[in-house]
């Protein structure tokens, strides 16, 4: 039931965000409510509403107010580093593959970790096995950021644990 409620809130927020019709037009708002309820009903009937589809265990407050700003900062810093590499007179690519530890206790936590690595420019998560993520990096500096474990610690804190546990 709690996953259905979370999905309902997420669908309503998405619809309001993308529709551009906040309660100024009640007919359009009614159509939005009907479409959200229809989508929720279909998801429940298909039995796809579970902890993977609505990850409550990550903690929405920590995710929105602590992790997302950190991730945005990392994306901006990585964008600047990749831009410097691209605009340099001599293209100084130092491509490499590294293994990064993923100490999250849940599968969704490891997926958040791998996706966060891929979202930062200059790095791509290639594969994930158990508690290791294989990452392709454009430069040694990008590899150092991933090897530092800062992102791993922050994703672990979303789950309410430190990576030392």
Image (cartoon, rainbow, N blue to C red):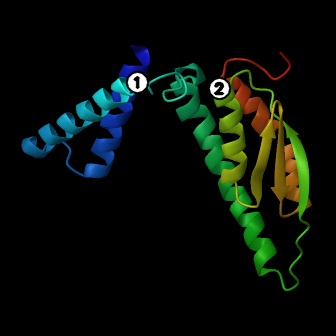
Q: Nearer the viewer, residue 112 or 148?
A: 112
Q: Is residue 84 left or right of residue 35?
A: right
Q: Quadrant of residue 86?
A: bottom right
Q: Which residue is mark 2?
A: 158
Question: Residue 46, percent across and down?
Answer: 39, 28
Query: Given this view, does label 2 or label 1 mark the residue nearer the observer?
Result: 1
Residue at 70% across / 54% down in the picture? 120
Q: Nearer the viewer, residue 50 or 79?
A: 50
Report how far apart the C-alphas of labels 2 and 1 lie in the structure: 17 Å
Can you name the residue that lies furthest to the bottom here? 89
Q: Which residue is mark 1?
A: 6
Mark 2, secondary structure of its residue = helix
Residue at 73% across / 17% down in the picture? 161
Question: Residue 109, percent across and down?
Answer: 67, 29
Q: Quadrant of the C terminus?
A: top right
Q: Quadrant of residue 106?
A: top right
């Amino acid at each position: 039931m709690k996953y259905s409620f979370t999905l309902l809130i997420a669908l309503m927020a998405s619809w309001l965000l993308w529709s551009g019709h906040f309660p100024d037009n009640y007919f359009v708002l009614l159509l939005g409510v009907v479409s959200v309820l229809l989508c929720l009903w279909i998801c429940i009937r298909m039995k796809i509403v579970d902890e993977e589809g609505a990850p409550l265990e990550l903690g929405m407050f920590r995710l929105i107010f602590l992790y997302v700003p950190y991730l945005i900062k990392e994306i901006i810093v990585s964008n600047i580093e990749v831009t410097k590499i691209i605009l340099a007179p001599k293209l100084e690519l130092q491509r490499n593959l590294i293994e990064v530890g993923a100490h999250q206790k849940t599968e969704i936590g490891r997926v958040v970790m791998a996706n966060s690595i891929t979202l930062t420019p200059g790095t791509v998560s290639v594969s994930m096995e158990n508690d290791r993520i294989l990452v392709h990096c454009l430069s040694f500096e990008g590899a150092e950021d991933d090897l530092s474990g800062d992102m791993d610690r922050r994703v672990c804190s979303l789950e309410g644990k430190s990576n030392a546990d």
